[in-house]
Image (cartoon, helix red, strand yellow):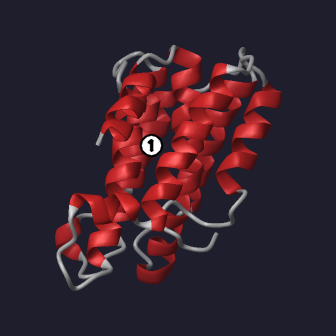
Amino acid sequence: MNNKLNIFQQVRELENWYAVAFSATLLERMLPNYTLFCEATEFADPSQYRNSLNTIWEWLSTPKAKINFSAQLEKIEESVPDANDFDNYGVYPAIDVAMSMSATILLIQGEDPQGAVVVSKLSQGGVEAFIEASTDEPLTTLEIKQHPLMQWEIETQKELLALLSNSPKSAETCKKLKALATSEGMSNIGLEI
């Protein structure tokens, strides 16, 4: 378990820009889960979430960008699926995306200084829940930890923290982060992008 705690501790210590950049990168990996859910259920237009994430990247790469994040937050909150309305498992990863998007915007607004920790936990928790939902047998903590998807999740978050610790606040760093998020062509739960 130390691995996870260690990651959350490091995420907690990230300063504002870096915390937002960390969150945006994890969101980039999670977003396809929301998009595919919307396409499968016709719940909402997934482009709204894509646009909101684009504005977060814009804020990161253009320091003087004037963005109305209160309006973005409203749009995000209008399109959160309710788990009770769907018998499709995909609703849970979609809700994780919505909660992560809100946490990141609240972090930018200074209303939730722990926003990045929320996103880190939601991403890992979503992977754990997906692994458990994909098997008929109950799994031990160790089995979940050793599952390839969880190993990939932990490695990605570690790699992201390492990259951020050696990178300036710049548009160039944002490009590297996006590349890291999409390099495997899969979302955090292994859905093809």
Q: Classify 110 as above or below 192.
A: above
Please give left or right for residue 51 compared with residue 167 in the image: left
Q: Position of residue 71 (x, y in %)?
A: 47, 35
Neighbourhood count class around disc 1 (C-alpha, 10 Å): few under 14, some 14–19, many 20 upward: many
- Name the residue carrying label 1: 101
Residue at 21% from the left image edge and 74% from the top image edge: 85
Q: Pick out the residue farthest to the bottom.
A: 136
Q: Is residue 112 left or right of residue 61?
A: left
Seen in the picture, residue 98 relative to 147 is either above or below; the reply is: above
Q: Provide residue 75's location: percent of width, then percent of height.
A: 44, 46
Which residue type does callout 1 highlight?
Met
Residue lying at 54% horizontally and 38% vertically, measured from the top left: 158
Which of these two is toward me, 111 or 68? 111
Q: Secondary structure at mark 1?
A: helix
Residue 74 in view here: no
Identify the image quadrant of the C terminus. bottom right
Residue 86 lies in quadrant = bottom left
Snapshot quadrant of residue 25:
top right
Say if residue 170 shows up in the picture. Answer: yes
Q: Residue 62: name its quadrant.
A: top right
Residue 129: percent from left, percent from top: 29, 64
Residue sitting at 50 percent across and 60 percent down? Answer: 188
Q: Count numbered badges in the picture.
A: 1
Q: Position of residue 8 (x, y in %)?
A: 37, 31
- Residue ranking furthest to the right: 172
For the N terminus, the quadrant is: top left
Query: Residue shown at 35%/24% (left/top)?
Result: 114
